[in-house]
Image (spheres, rainbow, N blue to C red):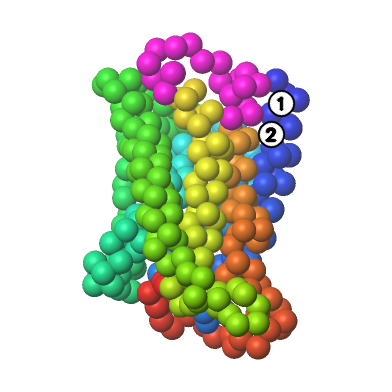
């Protein structure tokens, strides 16, 4: 068991460092490169910020041992309720889930209801949604404050009324509903994009006289950009689902009364999967997101685009 815990701590340290560097780079790129100032990228920036802080806490949790005994007084109570209970880490994990659902709905509205999107998609509303993601995540996660308590140098947890119902509710709100929202939305978006591609397909008469190929129009360019953003975000959501499903299934079964060994290799691996999710997205953006790759080249002086701090957020045409 000690070897498994050591391996998990080493893995969390690695994931934390990679997540801090990768998500920090994403935040800098979006903040500095002007053409990245879109509503969709505002949500991607928020996702990177959440994952950056999550990676930092994963790193700290792997490096900083919990004192035994926990010091008395207010410091001990705060340490128990905020750190030992993993309040901040799980709050960020929930915020990450809610933000993925939010960016999914933003893309859904932009592609399925483009005219309504033009009316609803404003900077103020985007900021309100992002703030709502943070507030709702930590408010929902605050139930743990009523479970953990400090006593005689130890942080203990007490039984609550209907613990199975509480556990199932946590599973449904923080995993099942967001995954269903993302699944339904992206399936519908895929159908709309396929139909849209068919509508803007150029005919033979649009072909150029010398090349025989159709010049790319604005509609076709927009559709390709939307498709690239769609593919990038769906990969992000698939990565989230793959990383979170094992741990969530174990948690769900536990709340249904199934005996779960929280010291087993299976559970430890599921925790490692959860931790790894916070560092995956920057690699996905670098490999798949063309706009992000272009912004990287801009940031490092390989194109003529200008850099500037975030002063405004435009509506995403992609």
Q: Residue at x 48, y 57 (%)?
A: 230
Look at the numbered disc 2 and give the secondary structure of its residue: helix
**Quadrant, the C terminus:** bottom left
Residue 269 part of the magenta segment:
yes
Disc 2 marks which residue? 8
Q: Name the mark on residue 23.
A: none
Q: Is residue 83 visible?
A: no
Relative horizontal placement of residue 177, taking residue 20 as reference (left or right): left
Q: Residue at x 49, y 46 (%)?
A: 237
- Residue at image location 43% in from the left, 73% down from the top: 219
Q: Nearer the viewer, residue 20 or 249?
A: 249
Q: Which residues are magenta?
A: 252-270
Q: Which residue is mark 1?
A: 4
- Say above or below: 210 vs 200: below
Q: Could you tell me residue 90's position as x and y percent? A: 46, 42
The reply, left or right, for residue 75 in relation to residue 300 is left
Residue 169 percent location from the top left of the image: 31, 30
Q: Residue at x 47, y 69 (%)?
A: 203
Count of numbered labels shown in the rendering: 2
| Whole-percent x, y for residue 93 in the image | 47, 45
Q: Are marks 2 and 1 in contact (CB under 8 Å)?
A: yes
Say above or below: 316 vs 282. Answer: below
């Amino acid at each position: 068991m000690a070897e498994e815990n050591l391996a998990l701590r080493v893995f969390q340290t690695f994931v934390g460092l990679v997540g801090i560097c990768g998500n920090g780079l994403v935040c800098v790129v979006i903040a500095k490169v002007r053409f990245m100032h879109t509503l969709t990228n505002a949500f991607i920036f928020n996702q990177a910020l959440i994952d950056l802080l999550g990676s930092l806490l994963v790193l700290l949790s792997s490096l900083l041992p919990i004192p035994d005994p926990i010091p008395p007084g207010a410091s001990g109570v705060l340490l128990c309720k905020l750190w030992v209970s993993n309040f901040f880490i799980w709050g960020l994990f929930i915020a990450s889930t809610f933000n993925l659902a939010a960016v999914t709905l933003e893309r859904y509205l932009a592609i399925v209801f483009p005219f309504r999107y033009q009316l609803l998609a404003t900077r103020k509303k985007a900021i309100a949604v992002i703030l709502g993601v943070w507030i709702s995540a930590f408010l929902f996660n605050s139930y743990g404050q009523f479970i953990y308590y400090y006593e005689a140098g130890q942080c203990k947890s007490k039984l609550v009324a209907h613990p199975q119902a509480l556990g199932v509710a946590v599973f449904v709100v923080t995993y099942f509903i967001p995954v269903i929202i993302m699944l339904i939305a992206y399936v519908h978006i895929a159908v709309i994009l396929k139909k849209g591609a068919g509508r803007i397909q150029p005919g033979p008469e649009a072909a150029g006289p010398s090349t025989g190929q159709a010049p790319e129009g604005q509609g076709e360019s927009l559709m390709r950009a939307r498709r690239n953003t769609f593919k990038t975000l769906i990969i992000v959501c698939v990565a989230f689902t793959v990383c979170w499903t094992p741990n969530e299934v174990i948690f769900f079964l536990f709340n249904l009364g199934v005996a779960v060994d929280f010291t087993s290799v299976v559970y430890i691996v599921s925790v490692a999967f959860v931790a790894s999710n916070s560092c995956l997205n920057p690699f996905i953006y670098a490999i798949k997101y063309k706009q992000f790759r272009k912004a990287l080249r801009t940031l490092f002086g390989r194109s003529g685009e200008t850099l500037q701090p975030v002063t405004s957020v435009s509506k995403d045409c992609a």
